[in-house]
Amino acid sequence: MWMSFLTRSVLENATSYAEAKTLLSDTKLLAPAYFILGGNRSGEASIITRSRTQNLNPLELDVKQGRWYVLETNYDHWKMPLFLDDRRTPAMKCMNQTTQANISIKTIYDVLSTKPVLNKLTTYTTLMQVSQGKLESFIRACPSPCMPW
């Protein structure tokens, strides 16, 4: 299945976080993909890293292990990112400095606006808050000096 059709179907038809997670994890795809899924209850968030046929090494929130957020920068979370394009380390540093107590739409936007998380290839940023039915998208530009990727 095409990722866009699957995503739309899940958004229109899934009635729970668990159902959405199962559909995104188990449906055969045309190509590999990352799905970042958040629910409307505390503790409902995961990164689903997909091959065409499998869910590879899923990552879920686990506050007991200190994982109060999940973060994806288009590199498999269990592998080191390409040294020329390590956006994960700066993003994690920003998240940890922000702290769980101070997370909001504004502070997430700030994290996503931090260079090199924001770079010349960033075209837009979308922020969603499921519990409030909130969806905001912003066309982005990275003022110089800015990494090309």
Image (tube, rainbow, N blue to C red):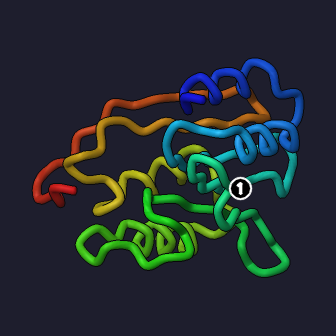
- Above or below residue 126? Residue 68 is below
Q: Is residue 85 left or right of residue 14?
A: left
- Nearer the observer, 48 or 113: 48
Name the outermost residue toward the top. Answer: 12
Q: Which type of secondary structure does the marked residue at label 1 adopt?
A: strand
Q: Position of residue 112 (x, y in %)?
A: 42, 52
Foreground: 73 or 97? Answer: 73
Crowdedness near tag 1: few (<14), some (14–19) or many (≥20) residues, C-alpha within 10 Å = many
Residue lying at 80% horizontally and 20% vertically, measured from the top left: 13
In x, y percent, where is residue 118? 31, 53
> Measuring 11% from the left and 53% from the top, which residue is drawn there?
144
Q: Is residue 127 above or below residue 36?
A: above
Q: Residue furthest left?
A: 144
Figure disc tally: 1
Which quadrant: the N terminus? top right
At 60% from the left and 52% from the top, the residue drawn is 50
At x 86%, y 37%, the residue is 19
Along the viewing direction, whichever of 72 and 102 lies nearer the viewer: 72
Quarter of the image that includes the C terminus: bottom left
40 relative to 42, above or below: above
Label 1 amino acid? Ser
- Which image quadrant is residue 129 in? top right
Task: Judge from the rendering whether residue 15 lies leftward or rightward of residue 139; answer left or right.
Answer: right
Hey, which quadrant is residue 15 in on the image?
Answer: top right
Looking at the picture, how far across and down is residue 131, in whole percent? 79, 35
Report whether 66 appears left or right of 86.
Answer: right
Q: In the image, residue 67 lies at what x, y percent?
A: 71, 73
User: With 129 as the anchor, is 111 left or right in this view?
Assistant: left
Q: Which residue is mark 1?
A: 46
